[in-house]
Image: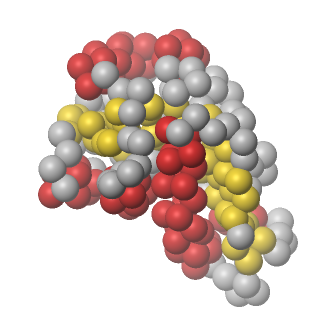
Amino acid sequence: KRVAILISGGGSNMVSLVEDMTGDHPARPVLVLSNRADAGGLDKAKARGIPTAVVDHRPFGSDRPAFEDALTHVLEQAHPDIICLAGFMRVLTEGFVTRWQGRMLNIHPSLLPKYKGLHTHQRAIDAGDTEAGCSVHEVTAELDGGRVLGQARVPIVPGDTADDLAARVLVQEHVLYPLVLRRFAEGQRDRIDLP
Ligand SMILES: N[C@@H]1O[C@H](COP(=O)(O)O)[C@@H](O)[C@H]1O
């Protein structure tokens, strides 16, 4: 299977996916695509010999479909079977999502369906939750709303800041996403929960 990975930032999840796609893994990374030319993950991908591309969203202003047409044009040249959103911070329209329906995954730093959207860790702390985590889900037109294929849980420790929690969850993201991608590439659609 051919996998394209969309990023906007440092790309630590992208690296964990790429480093797992070796040996008997049924998939290989064919493209790392960013909407930001200054995304730190681009250099990490180049250093691992993966083709990279940038489609800057800013020149398109509020014309999301035009931005997504440019994304789709670049993606189609890589012929991906699977698309992984990994810290990709643009909300995608229904048109784009429908085009890649059933072949696109995302990692979200909360225990979905709780805390869709942003600032997930602070919201979990403010709510007095005792645990948090991350979820890998299929991407649908509803933001962070698709079927959850995997979740990993971590404790919230009294006195935790959002940054403390984000760091603890990120460690689990790097375990969960590669696991779910491997199963997804093998055709498995049932959900896994860590630990
Ligand atoms: N969507 C969220 O954005 C962060 C991206 O981190 P990285 O993969 O760019 O390091 C991760 O926490 C991910 O869950």
User: What residue is shown at x 43% (from left), y 13% (from top)?
Assistant: 65
Is residue 127 toward the left or the right of residue 22 in the image? right
**Could you say where residue 66 lies in the image, as x and y percent from the top left?**
36, 13
**Could you say where residue 76 lies in the image, as x and y percent from the top left?**
30, 18
In this rendering, the answer to whether 73 lies above or below 130 is: above
**Could you say where residue 15 lies in the image, as x and y percent from the top left?**
34, 58
**Dividing the picture into quarters, in which one does residue 10 lie?**
bottom left
User: What residue is shown at x 63% (from left), y 39% (from top)?
Assistant: 188
In this rendering, the answer to whether 99 lies above or below 71 is: above
User: What residue is shown at x 15% (from left), y 57% (from top)?
Assistant: 47
Residue situated in front as seen by the camera: 112 or 136: 136
Is residue 124 toward the left or the right of residue 183 in the image? right
**Could you say where residue 158 lies in the image, as x and y percent from the top left?**
76, 86
Q: Is residue 181 visible?
A: yes
In this rendering, the answer to whether 89 lies above or below 165 is: above
Is residue 66 toward the left or the right of residue 38 in the image? right
User: What residue is shown at x 31% (from left), y 22% (from top)?
Assistant: 79
Quarter of the image for the N terminus: give it: top left
Is residue 47 toward the left or the right of residue 87 in the image? left
